[in-house]
Amino acid sequence: MSDRIYSLTRKTGETDISISLNLDGRGEADVDTGIGFFDHMLKSFAKHGFFDLDLKCEGDLFVDSHHSIEDTGIVLGQAIAGAVGDKKGIKRFGSFLLPMDETLVMCAIDLSGRPYLSYDLKLTTPQVGYFDTEMTKEFFYAVSYSAGMNLHLKQISGENNHHIIEAAFKAFAKALDEATSPELRLSGEVLSTKGSL
């Protein structure tokens, strides 16, 4: 399997974002979005998925965090799609049940090319640090649609909003790592009866 690295930049009137993603990395991350908790989540995503992630976002944080978080999701989804490429030889499906103290979150992924988000996290505070908690859903929606993935996130238990969000990011990382990993029983083909995804 060739190097699965993808880089891009996206500049709008609201954000200027550059990203480089290596699906076969060591979990090293250099992230700066201007939103401390969001940086922490993206670094956790990289670490637990063994992805190398270099991401810089300059956004209109004087407005709020919405554009920076949503647009980062768009760019990350595009980078995932670009790094995966034609999806030949990968497992396609991935799932993980991640515990974090009192919290338990399930993530399941299908890199089907058909975007869909099923989101069931019960967040009860408006912010964690300077991160607007309602943006958690917007971020994962943007990732799923830009990457063309079916993405399910379900909270099984949990009370602490920091734990719930962090468990979601880590579960997503572990499920994505599985979905993008090589399936040794495939030889240059995609895992689909249709022959393509």
Image (cartoon, rainbow, N blue to C red):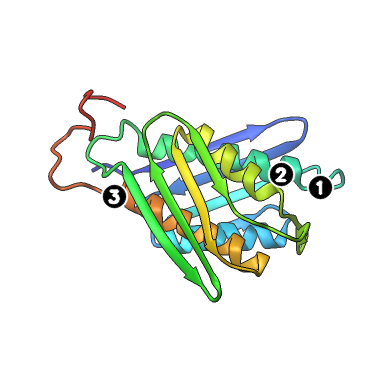
User: Which quadrant would residue 155 be assigned to in this image?
Assistant: bottom right
The residue shown at (54%, 40%) is: 143
The residue shown at (43%, 35%) is: 81
Mark toward the start of the polypeptide (3 vs 2): 2
Q: Inspect the image, locate mark 2, and give the three-letter code of the amino acid beneath it.
A: Ser
Question: Does 50 sit above or below residue 23?
Answer: below
User: Is the residue marked by circle 3 packed among few (<14), some (14-19), or many (20+) residues within 10 Å?
Assistant: some
User: Is the residue marked by circle 1 packed among few (<14), some (14-19), or many (20+) residues within 10 Å?
Assistant: some
Q: Residue 131 location, x and y as percent?
A: 74, 56
Question: What residue does disc 1 label?
Answer: 61
* Disc marking residue 181: 3
Work out which quarter of the rendered image holds the N terminus and state it: top left
Q: Give 116 or 187, whichever is nearer the viewer.
A: 116
Q: Inspect the image, locate mark 1, and give the three-letter code of the amino acid beneath it.
A: Leu
Q: Inspect the image, locate mark 3, and give the three-letter code of the amino acid beneath it.
A: Ser
* Disc marking residue 68: 2
